[in-house]
């Protein structure tokens, strides 16, 4: 299930990251969003990919000179705190910021094609990251 959902939603270059994503995500947890990102503070640090599922946020990096893949963040959504995002319609995109369980603040900017895509992705983020179950 995960593999077919990912392949259908992923940008073609993200398929290189599939083995890392597969090792981090359960097969019954389908991909909701796959996006190429940049780090606002480090624009030349390589290619970054974000995978958002119903239960996890996974971020990978492909380094520039050697094109090596590495896992940057693998977090259960329940363990993320201070989740915020900012929409930029002048250069269509969304900057997502989360604090991981280790206290490190992560910032990623998704470049999106147009304002309609920005609003669709914003709704996915809202539905997935803000609609957490209330503990009983």
Image: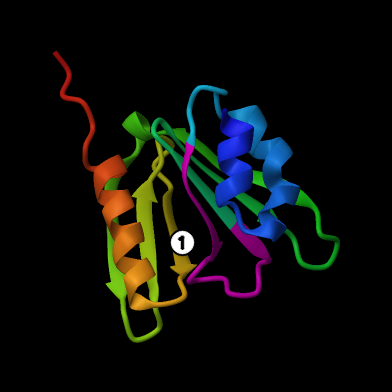
Residue at image location 55% in from the left, 23% down from the top: 26
Residue 99, image x, y percentages: 36, 46
Looking at the image, is 78 positioned above or below residue 34?
above
Expressed as whole percent of the image width and height from the top left, the position of residue 36 reads 57, 62
The answer to whether residue 12 is left or right of residue 35 is right
Q: On screen, 21 above or below 115?
A: above
- In the orientation shown, which residue stands out farthest toward the top? 136
- The residue to which callout 1 is attached is 108
Q: Magenta includes 43?
A: yes
The stretch drawn in magenta includes residue 66:
no
Residue 72 visible in this rendered orientation of the protein: no
The region drawn magenta spans: 31-48
- Asked if 98 appears above or below 29 in the picture, the reply is below
Q: Which image quadrant: the N terminus?
A: top right
Residue at image position (62%, 36%) is 4
Left or right of residue 69: residue 47:
left
Q: Image quadrant of residue 2?
A: top right
Q: Residues within 10 Å of mark 1 (few under 14, many from 20)?
A: many
Q: Nearer the viewer, residue 22 or 108?
A: 22
Q: Residue at x 71, y 49 (%)?
A: 15
| Residue 13 vertical placement versus 23 (above, below) | below
Left or right of 9 in this view: 109: left
């Amino acid at each position: 299930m995960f593999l077919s959902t990912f392949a259908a939603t992923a940008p073609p270059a993200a398929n290189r990251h599939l083995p890392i994503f597969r090792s981090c995500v359960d097969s019954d947890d389908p991909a909701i969003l796959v996006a190429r990102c940049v780090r606002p503070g480090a624009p030349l640090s390589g290619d970054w990919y974000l995978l958002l599922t119903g239960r996890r946020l996974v971020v990978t990096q492909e380094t520039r000179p050697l094109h090596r893949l590495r896992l940057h963040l693998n977090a259960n959504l329940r363990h993320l705190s201070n989740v915020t995002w900012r929409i930029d319609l002048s250069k269509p995109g969304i900057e997502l910021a989360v604090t991981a369980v280790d206290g490190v603040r992560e910032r990623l900017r998704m470049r999106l094609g147009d304002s309609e895509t920005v609003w669709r992705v914003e709704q996915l983020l809202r539905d997935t990251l803000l609609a957490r179950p209330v503990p009983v």
